[in-house]
Image (cartoon, grey):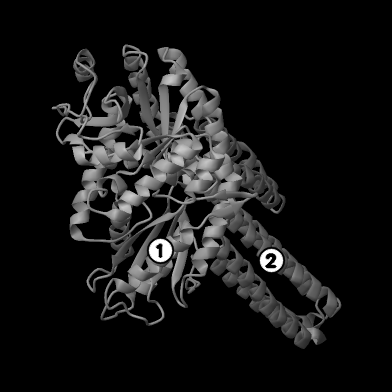
Amino acid sequence: MRLLPNHVDAWPTHLLEKRFGRLLVSGTLLAAVSLVVGLGCTGRQLRDEARTASQQALRVAELRGSIAYLDEWLTASARLAVATGEHHWADRYNEALPKLDAAIAEAAELASPETRGALASTTGEAHRDLVTMERRALSLAKGGDLASARALLDGPEFAYLKDVYASGIDGFGQDLAAFNAARTDALTDRAWLQAWGLALAVVVLVATGLWVLWRARLKKAQAHIVTVARTDILTGLPNRQRFYEAAEVILAEQTPQGRALLLIDLDRFKSVNETFGHDAGDEVLKLVAARLRGVVRGGDLLARLGGDEFALVLGQDGTLLQSGNEADAVAARIVTILADPFVIHGSAVQIGASVGISIQDPPLITVSDLMHRADVALSRAKLDGRRCVRIFEPEMDVEMRSRVLLERDLRQAVAQDVVVPHYQPLVDLRTGALVGFEMLARWPHPTRGMVPPDVFIPLAEDLGLIGALTEGLMRQACREATSWPHALTLACNLSPVQLCDPGLPGAIRAVLNETGLLPSRLELEVTESALVGDLALARASLGQLKVLGVRLAIDDFGTGYSSLRHLQSLPFDKIKIDRGFVAGMADNIDSGKIVSAVVGLGRSLGLVTVAEGIETETIAGLLRDLGCDIGQGWLFGRPVSADQIVTILSEEPVEHRAVPAAA
């Protein structure tokens, strides 16, 4: 991987170099005068004193750089903590604070008494007040009150204290440098009085050696500061600042074709932190970085931008992109390697990744433009179901703006319970009797009409709203189901994200207690794909739900992995056969064989079998002949509102007739 050009604003360095150069010239001239004066000491004393002055000057430069860096680290950690709600930023803040205090204390020891007094008064008070406000914001963020935390750090009082502190620290740094320069001058004066005139040649050699040594040590310290400031500490990859600097240089190189920029975002990474803790999340990020290093080619630029987002620039070694095919192939490889589980503390953690790609057109050379386009493509990839690769197209920009508006509307809809439950009948295939309903979410948007669930459910997962959305829908559905005949069941879907939530069983218990619905009437459906990963965690979560007395069903059976293992080790009561197999039974022999095998498997394990997507009497008859227990589909009824359920229940039991769709 190409590293950044080593350019950095070395604001203390050039001043110290100039000052030290003047001191060396003055020292050399004074040593020449000493030939006449005839006073001095041994060459060894002069060498030791010059070395002391050099070391103090170097330490002053290091401390000023460290104080500036650690102060920015503190502020950035606090703002990221209140912006994301992620607790590990508070830990980073707590790590940096004592380091900053130690650096300021050490610098104060090298300062004059007047400078120390000024630092302890106004600047010190501003520093303490800033720390108090930042800790308060971190406490609010930890308690979930991100809005108040952001308001505290964005307020005028915080900005004023920040200005007072920055001004004081800057003045302190200047006074510190001046004080140490004065000490160096005084040391030079004493050396002049002690120098032997005959040691002139030795003085010149020693001064030259010290100059070379000082420059080497200073450059080493400078390189270390640059590396720390531009490297992601967790993964060792370049950070956002370093990436932007390097990318600007790369994109400035003129090529007939453009470069490609890939934005990589981990899917469902938030659930890893919530389930296993932030330490486990950090380990996952390290392993992700290691896998990505194995994908990039020589000259490619890989960086971690922050959180669970990474960036990759292709084609820096002279390999030009004739089209998006090369970038698409690299992105597909990334999606594949990140789909494999990560083993953290003995547990398998399944995440995945989505990738957005932007190709640099010859006129389009700015990193910001490429980042924006890649971000738009990434959003489209996530919208299309995650674990996807999408290359930016102009129309995506319009879709992105539409998505932003949709996100805003969804937040309001969830908060105001605008998303409502509809119900689709479940029918006994042998008798034609109605046995229950499956609750399906419907979002009546004021301008977009009825928004499909496959659009807003993934969006709710991305926004962290899926728990509140599902709990609200389930509460309303359970309340309405209490007015149905007691023989009818209510089936509700659980998101894969919710299955990893340790608070799920408690939330279900609270809904049942609040609504009064018998637990035996509630069925919770989990897709088979949600079980891929940590089977032990799934078993524990489903076991706690089973203790509540609810029934459990595995949904879309046959579309995931290790299905027989799931049926054997997890406490399911029902198997729901995926609609894709059911719909193909009439004209596809293989589909019919698969459905027959699943029905037989369910019968042998004592599990109820449910077929989804039944639209014709022919399919219903085939399923009935195979011994499938329950049917669901448009043949028996489309999803309807709670008001229409009253009409259905007032008629004869449902028997192969369509229920009018909701308006």
89 to 471, vertically: above or below = below
Q: Is residue 296 left or right of residue 321?
A: right
349 to 34, vertically: above or below = above
263 vs 555, nearest the viewer: 555
Q: Is residue 97 left or right of residue 309?
A: right
- Label 2: which secondary element: helix
Residue at (54, 69) in percent of width and height: 14
What is the x, y in percent for residue 542? 52, 33
427 vs 245, nearest the viewer: 427
Decide if residue 133 is in sight here: no
Circle on res. 244 = 1
Of labels 2 and 1, earlier in sequence is: 2
> For the residue marked with disc 1, what is the amino acid?
Tyr
Count of numbered tags: 2
311 to 428, vertically: above or below = below
Q: Residue furthest front?
A: 625
- Label 1: which secondary element: helix
The residue at which mark 2 appears reads as 185
What is the x, y in percent for residue 43? 83, 79
Q: Residues within 10 Å of mark 1 (few under 14, many from 20)?
A: some
Decide if residue 196 is in sight here: yes
Residue at (21, 13) in percent of width and height: 650
355 to 499, vertically: above or below = below
What is the x, y in percent for residue 245? 42, 66
Spatial CA distance of label 2 from label 1 is: 42 Å
Q: Residues within 10 Å of mark 2 (few under 14, many from 20)?
A: some
> For the residue marked with disc 2, what is the amino acid?
Asp
